[in-house]
Image: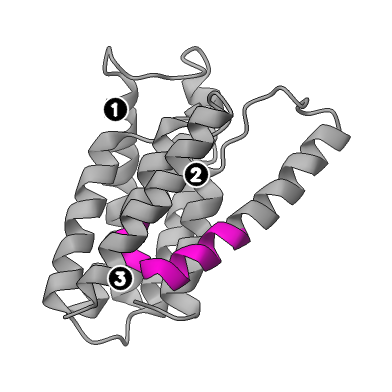
């Protein structure tokens, strides 16, 4: 437990600093560049809690699986916050998440064909949805689904998409009902894909 607390606090500090660094890049496509501080006011305590809960849950898992799960959790947690705060999912977070996922597939002798089929099929379907809806699904979401396919495989990826769409749809409907958003407002689905993935990896079917 103590190790999980220390690791969570350390990674919260560096993860938050990394997010702030990415926000300051001149090419960063921020949706709310003048509201960085206000929209991030709860980031550090919530990020620490998310990391602590998931890290502690895999504390008894034998390495190297434990290391891969913790790495996935770290990047997914950061993606949750950047998408909630600024509606952006950075390639600089997706690339290492994909890289670690490929290492996990190879190292843990997971079914390669299933993982890359999930990445290609899932990413391809969401790319088509993005094209048909003219941006109803963002490019970051498309790339995130591709990467999650590597981690999850076809069956688990389908479960994640269904869970995320149901929960995200309920939240979106509530926001519209209480006039926090309208039907034309952009809605960040990335955090729900990430949270559903955490559930699958840590509490349900695993890798």
Q: Are marks 1 and 2 in contact (CB under 8 Å)?
A: no
- Quick one: label 3, few (<14), some, or many (20+) residues within 10 Å? some
Q: Which mark is residue 22?
A: 1
Residue 152: % across, % down: 37, 67
Total labels drawn: 3
Tell me if residue 161 is in the magenta stretch.
Answer: yes
Q: Are marks 3 and 1 in contact (CB under 8 Å)?
A: no
Identity of the residue drawn at 46% across and 14% down: 33
Q: Find numbered disc 2 in the image and state the secondary structure of the residue it sits on.
A: helix
Distance, label 1 to label 2, CA atoms, is: 18 Å
Question: In the rendered view, does 50 fall on the left or right side of 21?
Answer: right
Determine which residue is flagged by label 3.
114
Dominant SS of magenta comes to helix
**First in sequence: mark 1 vs mark 2:** 1
Judge by depth and name the residue closer to the eye, 88 or 114: 114
**First in sequence: mark 3 vs mark 1:** 1
Instruction: Residue at the far right: name it.
Output: 177
- Quick one: label 2, few (<14), some, or many (20+) residues within 10 Å? many
Q: Which residues are magenta?
A: 148-163
Q: Find numbered disc 1 in the image and state the secondary structure of the residue it sits on.
A: helix
């Amino acid at each position: 437990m103590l190790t999980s607390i220390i690791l969570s606090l350390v990674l919260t500090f560096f993860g938050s600093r990394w997010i702030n660094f990415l926000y300051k890049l001149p090419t960063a496509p921020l949706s709310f560049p003048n509201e960085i501080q206000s929209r991030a006011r709860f980031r550090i305590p919530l990020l620490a809690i998310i990391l602590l809960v998931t890290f502690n849950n895999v504390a008894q898992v034998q390495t190297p699986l434990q290391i891969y799960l913790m790495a996935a959790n770290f990047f997914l947690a950061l993606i949750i916050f950047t998408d909630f705060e600024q509606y952006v999912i950075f390639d600089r977070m997706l690339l290492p998440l994909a890289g670690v996922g490929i290492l996990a597939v190879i190292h843990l002798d997971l079914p390669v064909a299933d993982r890359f089929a999930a990445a290609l099929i899932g990413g391809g379907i969401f790319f088509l949805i993005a094209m048909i809806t003219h941006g109803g699904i963002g490019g970051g979401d498309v790339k995130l689904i591709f990467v999650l396919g590597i981690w999850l495989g076809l069956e688990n990826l389908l479960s994640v998409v269904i869970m995320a769409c149901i929960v995200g749809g309920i939240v979106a409907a509530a926001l519209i009902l209480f006039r926090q958003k309208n039907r034309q407002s952009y809605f960040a689905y990335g955090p729900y894909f990430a949270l559903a993935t955490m559930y699958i990896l840590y509490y349900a079917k695993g890798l």
